[in-house]
């Protein structure tokens, strides 16, 4: 039977030669993830079960990143719960404030996830790791607890939609724009419980940071997962990770820099897809998702002169070093509109340090912005940038539901970092070409 990359990964992890969409499987896990919102519930369920030992303390990550540094007593208690559970079970990958980062940027950076892996996380944006050719998906906290107990996950093999992006990307257009236009086309339920496989000329030339952004937002189309076949760009990324992390990278991974293994992680030419969507990106421009859905997408030139009170550049979607470089390039030597708050959030401590060494943080501060410690913060209406009644924000985050970033009468627009930075300068949603 001819298989997609998703079917191949799932088949391998449940000990079969092939699996069929719709089939239920009991699949072994390579890695699991919980944060300060979801993991405490999983901890409660784990302890209620009566089990006293996790399946593998090296295959669990606990990352307090959503409300940290703790914004109040309740969030401090949530983080404490993670800390105590990690200590009790000697969880190897617990990352405290000062060493942590936004989970979906941190795990790839540390080499904890990679091609061919099967990963679950009690966070919907766990689909991010599909950028490296993994099957990764978000689950509920109870499923995470079961994973900690058994080392397995029970799931239905998804059908796959193939998204083919043809042509050369224009200037200022990147992975965030590709996924926004895609969600705008198929809708927030258009890929419900389906694997979204991204391919084509534009994807093959897309840098890793942009691939992460695309797979991160697969869930915004209802996708079970997002995935890109691992290629030379992914190979070089993982090689750099191995080099930078050294002995800290787990051994015996399927991505241990063996090209023959990587070559098997491709969909068969005559694999069956439930749908195939094709796009020519040659004439696309930066996209903006208007309130209150990620699918309410327009080209930036069609948005009109929309005033913004706040700009947020960061999150698990666009808080990586390339995002900060693009933002600094636009902001250098310029000033943020005095009526606008600019909040910059590097996604991890390593990215923060790199941005500092490159002088990017100085650019942001001199422009009139504020730089935060790594945190999810404003993306989910947690802290570090909550909106008041009637305020509007343009953000590089991944969701703009009503009340997502604060008051239910506030407005969130989604964009790439270039549009966000340009908008901070002018005070209204702006094409980066108009200020760069």
Image: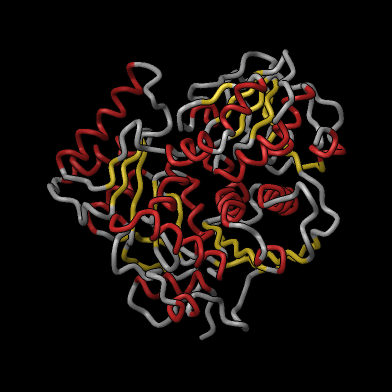
Answer above or below: position of 21 versus 106: below
- Quarter occupied by residue 294: top right
For the image, the number of numbered tags is 0
State left or right for residue 291 relative to residue 370. right
Q: Is residue 222 visible?
A: no
Work out whether residue 352 or residue 62 is closer to the camera in this orientation and state it.
352
- Quarter occupied by residue 155: bottom left
Find residue 170 and report its horizontal and vertical position in percent: 80, 54
Q: According to the image, what is the colour scheme of the structure?
A: secondary structure
State left or right for residue 53 relative to residue 427. left
The C terminus appears in which quarter of the rendering?
top right
Q: At x 65% / y 59%, what residue is drawn?
A: 206
Q: At x 54% / y 25%, what residue is drawn?
A: 371
Find residue 340 and report its horizontal and vertical position in percent: 70, 18
Q: Is residue 255 visible?
A: yes
Find residue 411 and report its horizontal and vertical position in percent: 69, 25
Q: At x 46% / y 77%, what residue is drawn?
A: 259
Q: Residue furthest bottom?
A: 1
């Amino acid at each position: 039977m001819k298989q997609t990359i998703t079917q191949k990964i799932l088949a391998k992890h449940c000990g079969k030669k092939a699996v069929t969409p719709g089939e239920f499987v009991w699949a072994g896990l390579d890695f699991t993830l919980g944060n300060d919102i979801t993991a405490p519930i999983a901890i409660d369920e784990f302890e209620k079960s009566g089990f006293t030992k996790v399946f593998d303390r090296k295959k669990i990550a606990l990352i307090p990143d959503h409300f940290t540094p703790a914004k109040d007593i309740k969030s401090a208690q949530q983080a404490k719960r993670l800390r105590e559970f990690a200590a009790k079970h000697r969880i190897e990958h617990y990352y405290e404030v000062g060493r942590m980062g936004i989970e979906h940027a941190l795990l790839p950076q540390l080499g904890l996830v990679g091609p061919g892996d099967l990963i679950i996380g009690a966070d919907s944006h766990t689909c991010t790791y599909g950028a490296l050719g993994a099957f990764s998906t978000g689950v509920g906290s109870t499923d995470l607890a079961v994973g900690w107990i058994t080392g397995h996950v029970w799931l239905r093999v998804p059908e796959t939609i193939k998204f083919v992006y043809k042509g050369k990307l224009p200037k200022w257009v990147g992975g965030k724009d590709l996924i926004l236009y895609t969600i705008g086309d198929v809708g927030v339920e258009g890929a419900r419980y389906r694997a979204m496989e991204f391919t084509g000329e534009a994807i093959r030339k897309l840098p890793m940071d942009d691939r992460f952004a695309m797979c991160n937002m697969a869930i915004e189309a209802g996708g079970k997962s997002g995935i890109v076949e691992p290629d030379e760009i992914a190979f070089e990324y993982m090689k750099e990770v191995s080099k930078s992390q050294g002995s800290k990278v787990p051994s015996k991974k399927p991505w241990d820099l063996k090209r023959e293994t990587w070559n098997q992680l491709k969909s068969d030419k005559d694999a069956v897809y439930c749908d195939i969507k094709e796009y020519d990106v040659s004439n696309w421009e930066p996209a903006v998702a208007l309130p209150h859905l990620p699918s309410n997408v327009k080209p930036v030139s069609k948005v009109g002169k929309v005033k913004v009170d706040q700009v947020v550049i960061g999150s698990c979607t666009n808080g990586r070093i390339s995002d900060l470089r693009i933002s600094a390039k636009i902001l250098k030597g310029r000033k943020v509109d005095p009526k606008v708050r600019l909040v910059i959030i590097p996604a991890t401590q390593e990215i923060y340090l790199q941005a500092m060494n490159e002088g990017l943080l100085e650019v942001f501060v001199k422009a009139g912005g504020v730089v935060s410690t790594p945190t999810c913060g404003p993306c989910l209406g947690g802290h570090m940038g909550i909106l008041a009644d009637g305020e509007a924000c343009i953000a590089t985050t991944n969701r703009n539901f009503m009340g997502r970033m604060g008051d239910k009468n506030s407005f969130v627009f989604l964009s790439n970092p270039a549009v966000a930075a340009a908008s901070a300068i002018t005070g209204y949603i702006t094409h980066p070409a108009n200020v760069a």
